[in-house]
Image (tube, rainbow, N blue to C red):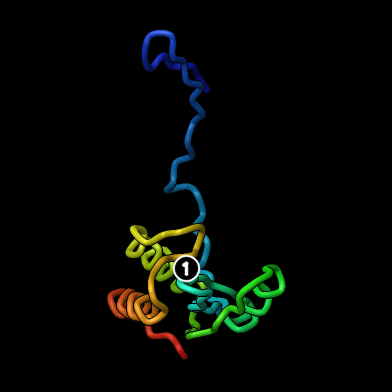
Amino acid sequence: MRWEEREPGEFWFLLPIADESKVPSRPPDTRRTFIYVVSRGAFTKIGISRNGGQHRMATLQRMSPGEILVFHWEAFGPANEIRQVERRVHGTLAAYLILAEWFDVTPERAIEVVKAEMAELGIVCAQ
């Protein structure tokens, strides 16, 4: 641990970083995880859940007054792969982000992007 002056009067407290070669790697998380697409009005949510999109949709609906959520699509696969797909989809659609995992895109467009990211990564998921 040490202090470092980055700019005059600006000090940073630096902690040592472990040598990554000595940090044991975790095995991939292969638990079944779902990626799903639901919509509410003009907005579409792309998310992941261990319990499935319809189950997650029911939970979201119970927590929100107003319009009914509409379930559109889901696929499942190993968690490590599904998380990677979700991150890439959110990145691809970042220009349309409204809030958290909600985007100003049609459900059809969201499904198209999810399937394209899965194909690009060579991930085959059950539907």
Residue ID at (49%, 25%): 14
Q: Quadrant of residue 69?
A: bottom right
x, y (%) of residue 78?
50, 77
Judged from the image, the secondary structure of the residue bearing numbered disc 1 is helix
- Horizontal side of residue 77 vs 58, given as left or right: left
Residue 46 is at least partly visible in this image: no
Percent of width and height locating residue 58:
67, 79
Residue 32 location, x and y as percent? 56, 80
Give residue 102's position: percent from left, percent from top. 48, 65
Residue plotted at (51% across, 54% down): 24
Q: Can the viewer see residue 92 in this picture?
A: yes
Q: Which residue occupies the foreground of this view, 104 or 82?
A: 104
Farthest residue toward the right? 62
Mark 1: amino acid: Arg
Q: Against 114, is 87 above or below? A: above
- 74 left or right, relative to 109: right
Q: Which residue is mark 1?
A: 83
In the picture as drawn, the residue positioned furthest to the top comes out as 8
